[in-house]
Image (tube, helix red, strand yellow):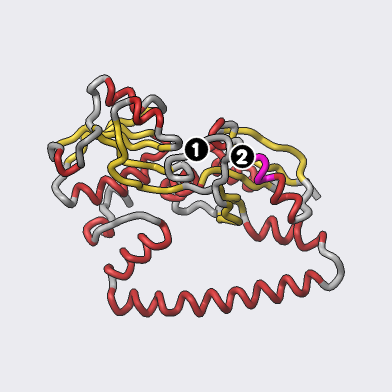
Amino acid sequence: MDKLICVIPKNARLKLCRQISLNWLKENKISYSEFLEVRGEDVPLFVEKLIKEGKNAVGVTGEDLFKEWQLQNPSSNLFLIKKEEWKDSTSVQLFGKPTLCLLGPKNKKLEDLNKNLRVCISSKYKNLAKHYLNNLETKGFKFEKIYVAGSAEETFIKGLADLVVDIVYTGESSKNAGLEVYDEIFSSNVVIIGKTENIINKFYLENLAPGQKEKILKRYRFKLENVKKQIEPLIKDVKLRGDDAIIELIKKFDNISLTRAQLKVSKEEI
């Protein structure tokens, strides 16, 4: 049987992903053939392509980058296998973990600014930003969106943008640019992603001691029953309250704020 290919980010900010990968592989007694280093935002793409080619692969990346991938690729078959808390002792993070934020001029609030605004967005977070800004547009704001691969704060410094949507880590670079956090859009942990059934069936179960496999399978059936009990009240609530319930659930589970108007999908988006 082919050993596992583990796709990890080469970005400096996500270097702890390698250690998290090693811990998870050791914990589950999974043998691996190699670590493939790519950019963090490309991890889901590589994992999905490798799996389609018949390879055994998982990826480890930032939760924000995986969420962006899911929004852009709603038909993707990748699943969240495990989530790990972001723990980085090498620096002091403003929010304890990387957080996608709306940034604006210091000593002001969004309500103080003009309703027609230029916003520079890190292109890695185009869809997360779109969902967030759509909500603000229902409140009367209009945005000229500028997408950059890097140096988003520089557009504010040079007077090319009024607002910035980007990841805040220590907060030093935004502070030096004369920006402050207006709102937190998405806080990120570390996620292990792949096709769950591939990993469990091909690696984990076959390495168990006699008798353990049966116990694990029983435990999974039990968990599915528990999930059903948790989901049924949600379905009933949606039937009863409709869009309001859906909006609350999206906020609760996906950390995305939407309005009734945003639930409607245009012909262009389809």
Q: Amino acid at mark 1?
A: Val
Q: Earlier in the sequence, mark 2 or mark 1?
A: 2
Q: Give the SS element for disc 2.
A: helix
Farthest residue to the top: give it.
158
Q: Amino acid at mark 2?
A: Leu
Instruction: Residue 139: give x, y in percent of width and height.
Output: 16, 51
Q: Are marks 2 and 1 in contact (CB under 8 Å)?
A: no
Q: Which residue is mark 2?
A: 16
Spatial CA span between label 2 and label 1:
15 Å
Determine which quarter of the picture holds residue 254: bottom left
Q: Which residue is mark 1?
A: 92
Q: Residue at x 43, y 48 (%)?
A: 187
Determine which quarter of the picture holds residue 114: top left
Instruction: Residue 60: give x, y in percent of width and height.
Output: 60, 44
Residue 173 position (above or below residue 51):
above
Instruction: Residue 248: give x, y in percent of width and height.
Output: 33, 65
Taking 52 as reference, is 156 left or right?
A: left
User: In front: 72, or 21?
Assistant: 21
Magenta stretch: includes residue 86:
no
Provide the residue span drawn in magenta.
17-21
Taking 115 as reference, is 183 left or right?
A: right
Instruction: Residue 58: give x, y in percent of width and height.
Output: 64, 47
Q: Give the SS element for disc 1.
A: loop
Q: Residue at x 62, y 41 (%)?
A: 17
Determine which quarter of the picture holds residue 32: top right
